[in-house]
Structure formats: structure tokens, C-alpha cells
Image (cartoon, grey):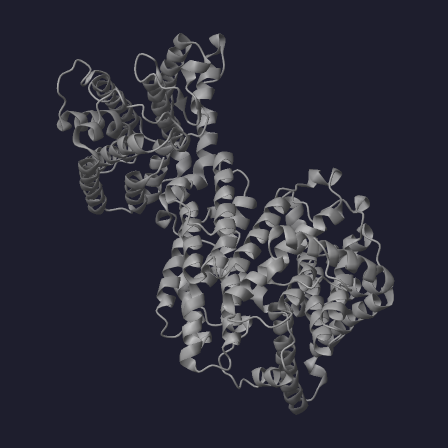
Amino acid sequence: MSVPAGTRGPFPFGAQDLEAGRLAGGVQHTLAHFRHWRDTNAGRVAEHVDRFTAHLAAIAAERRPWRIPGRLRTGRRRRRERAALVREAVHFGVYNLAEVPPPAMVEAIADGAHGRLPTLGDLVRGIDESRGAAGVVASFEQRLPLLKGVPETRWLAGRLDRLHRTLPEAVVRAGSMGKVVRTMAGVLVIGAYDTLDDDLAQARAHLARILPAAYAYGAAYAIVDDTLQDLPGYVPAADRERYHQMVVRGLSTGEPVDLDEVPDHPLAEELHDLHGLLLESYPFRSYRHLYHAAESMYLAQHRDSARTAQAAASTPLTAMYPDIFIKASMSRVVANVLARRRLPDGFYARCVNTIFLSQLRDDLVDREEDGQGNRLTPFTYPPGQTDTNPLYDLFAYNAYVAGEVFGDDAGATDALAYYGARRLAMHLSTGRGRADGLLRDYPATGEIARFLRTAAGLPRRAAHQLEAADQRLRKRVGRILSSRDQTKVDCRTFVADRLRYLNEVTQRYQPRAGTGGLGEIVAYAMGGTGKRLRPALSLMLAEGLGVDPASIEPVLAASELFHTASLVFDDLPAQDNATFRRGRPAAHLVFDEGSVQLAAVSMISAGFGLLAQLGGRYPADRITEVIAYVGTVLGPERLCRGQHQDLHLGRDGAAVTGEQILQMYDLKTSTAIEAALVPLMMVTDRPAGEIAVLKQYAHHTGIVFQIRDDILDATSSTEVLGKDAGNDTGKTNLVRVYGLAEAHRLMRAHLADAVRCCDQLPFDTDLLKCTVHHFASRRR
């Protein structure tokens, strides 16, 4: 990328420079200029670091009110509070808007003259924690009056609640909902600033317009950053690549993504919806720069997240700086494009060239967490191997922005140093040895060493009061929404959250390798991209009943062994002659057919042996009943009979009725679902009436599952399904007999009956309801 003639200083970015290729060249220019400026302006860097230290000294002095007489103390407190508001208003402009607000506006904001521009700290106050997401939105309405009466706030409460129920449990517990709300709040406050000179109706209309996009931006962080990129193993590798392609294509072309092409998971559906929300309010043709910025940010984050600690051997630290620069700066660009109707001259140059300073600071603060997560950042990079000093760069870039981006403006310089000092002091003073560790790992000038020691010496009580308002908002909301009723989550999230546990349980209990190598075949059949739906159903029922999963692990493992054995037999040449199962070749294509049959028999035998182990937790007579029951449902009158019907219905040329097919579905599929649920009801001694209702639920749910399977077999692809599509071409199924329209009608009828069964049970059945709804709409 060519640099404009006469360019001296940071690159003069414009909207046209946000496309990934052009952006990279401009970033390299700014970083090269920064390195030259850093190496030739040591005195200015030292002077700026001293500002950091002076701010800490002033902050420490403010925390000694007992030394001031009461009346003077009150007056001084008021002056301090107003000065803090002025400084916060300036910092908000510099950091969030990439501009120094006019003095008159700063004074008006500090005096509360506008009355409708809250600080992020204001949004933390008064949240009704008992109301969850609705309480957060209600607090926003109270603290940001422009939102009062806006219908979109009801929509927002619903969307936040839905996101809360679909994010991975680990992400929710880590406080990711706080990040969502903080990001959303930042966009809304920028939007409120943009309307300070408008009448109330105009301002309210603007916030109503940007609110869905503000939510979409925040939600995308939780899904893309916290889940897809920072939660390894949660999403299967193949699906992870599909997510990646979906995001890149959506941002680069603006074309709506076909929902049938995305992974069958609520987070994929949410990403699909978020893209639609953006396109609706921000058409691609008119806002191409917005999508370029978002794409550049995503690609930089994607590359950066792939770097583990081991990459340090082949990646110089300075080679990482451009992606860190891009992902941070584009985040602020996107927020402003979403929130403001018109961006002032020079905005892109100031914004893009500023935010790298915050990312370096955040990477230092997150050093311990990133190290535990094996993530490679400037401050987890092995200190002795760096080709630059990230600690010095952190302070030097802050000074660089003050001088080269904001022209040594006094207010901007003061705000950058003050808030930088606060953020670092909060971290250094609350962790013993952090400052000493930095001084041990990195060369430090006298000024930097003095600041680090001053920060480390602040009293903890004072340090906690220094936490930035946006961080307080993130932590407060993250804590409020860090737990949830597990019976209310999306059933697919419930399964995904517990898939690792289910895989561990089934592996722990499955037959081991022994003579004849049957264990290897069992391990292969049990592996692949198994959904573990049967044991997951057992866990869902346990959740509703309040049963400890550890007490029913033999049931979980046995149900998966029984189910997988039935699939192995189902795939054999003598039956369906399938070639693809669980995302890879069917077992009989990898091992000899006779051994595969024996392995399946061994899985059934082992399953019965596992059921007997329930005797360690439950009365022996109940275990005897469970074993007898399972033997019956898997035997010649239920599951095997259904499989036999599947083999022979219509094969002799005789006409087959829909009733016969539905009976076969009940025997073949509903029985397997019933066998996953009823044993738990039996061992916990639930009433016979409840067990009968649950059997009816299994009956209808299995038929819903099988009809949907027929529909998918006729309309989907092998790649999407993970097993052979069109495999029923030579067999009788409901779609072939009735056609697609009638198959859909029957599926909806059985869905309604299954939901009615759930409503008749006296315990929580929301997960079971969600499951049958998912069976009716699944895409694979």
C-alpha cells in the first residue's frame, strides 16, 4: 500500500482504508513511525510516565480526608467530583470518540446540563439483580432516559435472556454477559452523545434505531471471541471451520447466509440473526466501510487467537503487533459507525491510531489469565526472546498518541495518563509481586520502575475505587448473569456443555481392548461426532428431577452403548449398507464385518452389566426391574422387531401403509428414547402414572425424530448430515408414502402431543420440550 506523499507521522486513515489489505499497510506505516518516534523521544516518554506517577500521588492524597476539616472537606470533595467529571468527559471523547470535546460541551456535561448522557458508572447503579437480564435493561432505561418508552427495550430484554440461555456454561460463568452489556452500553452512550443537541423525539428515535445493532455487536463478542476462539474443543473442528466461513462470507459480501448451511447449534443461529439485524439497519451498499472494519477486526482476531505460547519460537513479537493493533482499533471504529450519524473529519486517523495503547495495557492486565489459557500475547511472550520491550512500548505508545495523534492537547494528554495510570494501578496493587515480576522480566527506565512501585504500594481499598467504570459495569453484570437455571437453557447448549462429560463417562465405562481386538472396534464405533442424544436425554431428565448425574452414570453409558450397537447393526450390508456414520466411514468398512457384529454384541452385553452397577446406589429390587425392562424394550417385541420391520416393509412389493411405518418408527426409535428415560424414573421410584406419561412422550418424540430424519434424507446432503443422505431411496419411509407436506403435518401433530405430555408431568420438563422442538427443526 502506498503512503500518501508528504505523510509524516501516523498514517492518515480514512473510511476507504478499512478493507483488510489496505488497512494492513497503513498499520505497518504507523507502527514504523511509532518505533522511530519512540527511539528518538526518550525524554518525552519519561515525562509522560511521570504524569502517570503524579496522578497516583494525587489519588493517594485524595484518600486521606481525615486530614482536612469537615467544611473544607465537603467543598474540596465537590470540586474533586466536578474535576473528575470533566476529566471523564474528556477521556470519553478521546478514547471512545477519537476527538477532544469542545470545552463548552465538557463543562455542560460536567454540570449535568444535558441530563441525558450517563457515564458507564451510572449504569451500574440500581440494577435489580433478582430480575436477571430484564433487571439490567430496566436499569438502562432508568439511567439512560432516552430509552424510556422505546419498544425495542422489551425486545432487548428478550434477546439478552435468550443469549444468556444459549451461551456455553463456561462462558456464562466467566462473566461474558458482562462483556456483552458493556459493549452494548458503549454504543448506546456514544449514540446518546451524538444526539445531545437534538430534541428528545429525535434522540429517542436514534437510540431506538441503533439499539438492535448495539446488541448484535455485544453478542458477537461473546459468541466469536469467548466461545469460538477462546473455548477450544467446545465446537467440533468441522463446525468451527463452517462458522469461520459463515462469518467471513457474511462480512465480505453482505449476502444473507442460508440458515440451512450453518451448524445446527443455537449460537450459529444467533450469529445468523445478528448478521440479519445489521443488514437491516446498515445496508451493505451504504455501509461497506462498516463491514470492512468488522471483517478486518474478525480476521485479525482469528489469526491472533490461533497463536499459542508455542508459536513464540517462530513468530517475532513485533510481527504480532499489527493484528493486535487492528483488532483493537477496528472495535472502536465499528462502535462509532454504528452509533453516530456522521463522523467528523479526521476521525478514522485519530481512532485507528489511538486504541493500540489500550490493547497493550489490557494484555498486561490479563497476563496471568492469558498465560493459563496458553494464549500468546505481548506479555505472555517469553521475555528473554522478544525483539521489542512491550512494557516500554505500553508507556511509549501512550505518549505517542498524546503527542502525534492529539497534538499535545493538554486535556487529552492528562486524560490518557490519568486513566492509564488508574487501570494499571488497579491491577498492580491487587496482586502481590506483579510489579516486581515486570521489573524482573523487562528492562525498565527509572521513571517506569518508579511508577510500577508506586502503583504496587497503593492501599487495596483505594485501588478498588480506581477501577474504570466500564470494567465495573462488565464485572457487575457478569456476576449477576454468571449463573442460570440449567433447566431453562437451550437443550442443544445443555448437550454441548455436557458433551465432554458424556464422552468421558462413555469412554470410562465402555469395553476395553482385549483378545481379538474388539475393544478397538467398540472405541471406533463410539467415537466420531456422536451427538450422545440418549444419555443427554437421561441427564435432562435428571436435571428436572434434581438427581445427581454421578448416581446414574451406568445408565448414561449403557444407553449410549445400546444405541451405538443398534447403529452398527443398522449400517451393515445386510441391513442399510451405509457407508458414512458420525462423520466418518461406517465401522464395517474399516474392520471386517464379522468382528464388527461381535463388537456390537459385546456392547449390548456390557450395557446390561453396567445397569447392574446401579445396585451400589439404589435398592436391588429396582435394579432388577430396570434390567428386566431394558431387556424387554431392546428385545424381539420392541427395538429388534422395529428393525426387522424396517428391513422387510415393502421389500416384497406389497403396499405399505402410513400406520405400518409409524408403528415401525415407534418400535425402532421411540423405544430407544424410552429406554434412556424410564430407567431413571424406575430407580428413583417415580409413580407409575408419571412413567406412563413419559413413555407417551418418548413415543411421540421418537416419531418426530424419525419423520424429520426422513425429511432430511430427502432434502439434505451427506456433508451436512454426517451420514449417508438419500440412503432411504430403496426403502419405505413416510415421505415416500405420504409426501413432504403430509409428513410435515404429522410431525407437527406428534410434536404437539409430546409437549402436552411434558405439561402433564409434575416436575420441570423444559429441557424435554426443547428437545422435541429441536428434533422437529434440526438440520442434521
Say whether residue 449 is left or right of residue 230: right
Above or below for 391 versus 348: above
- Asked whether the viewer can see residue 33, the reply is yes
Of 643 and 402, nearer the camera is: 402
Above or below for 226 versus 362: above
Q: Residue at x 71, y 51 (%)?
A: 321
Above or below for 750 versus 96: above
Residue 689's image quarter? top left
Of 151 and 562, nearer the camera is: 151
Residue projecting furthest to the front: 5
Q: Position of residue 157 (x, y in %)?
A: 38, 62
Residue 434's image quarter? bottom right
Say whether residue 721 is left or right of residue 304: left
- Asked whether the viewer can see residue 484, the reply is no
Say whether residue 360 is left or right of residue 194: right
Q: Residue at x 17, y 31 (%)?
A: 738
Q: Position of residue 274 (x, y in %)?
A: 43, 54
Tell me the quarter of the image containing the C terminus.
Answer: top left
Say whether residue 628 is left or right of residue 565: left
Residue projecting furthest to the bottom: 71
Q: Position of residue 144 (x, y in %)?
A: 46, 75
Q: Position of residue 273 (x, y in %)?
A: 40, 52
Above or below for 385 versus 518: below
The number of numbered discs placed on residues in the rendered structure image is 0
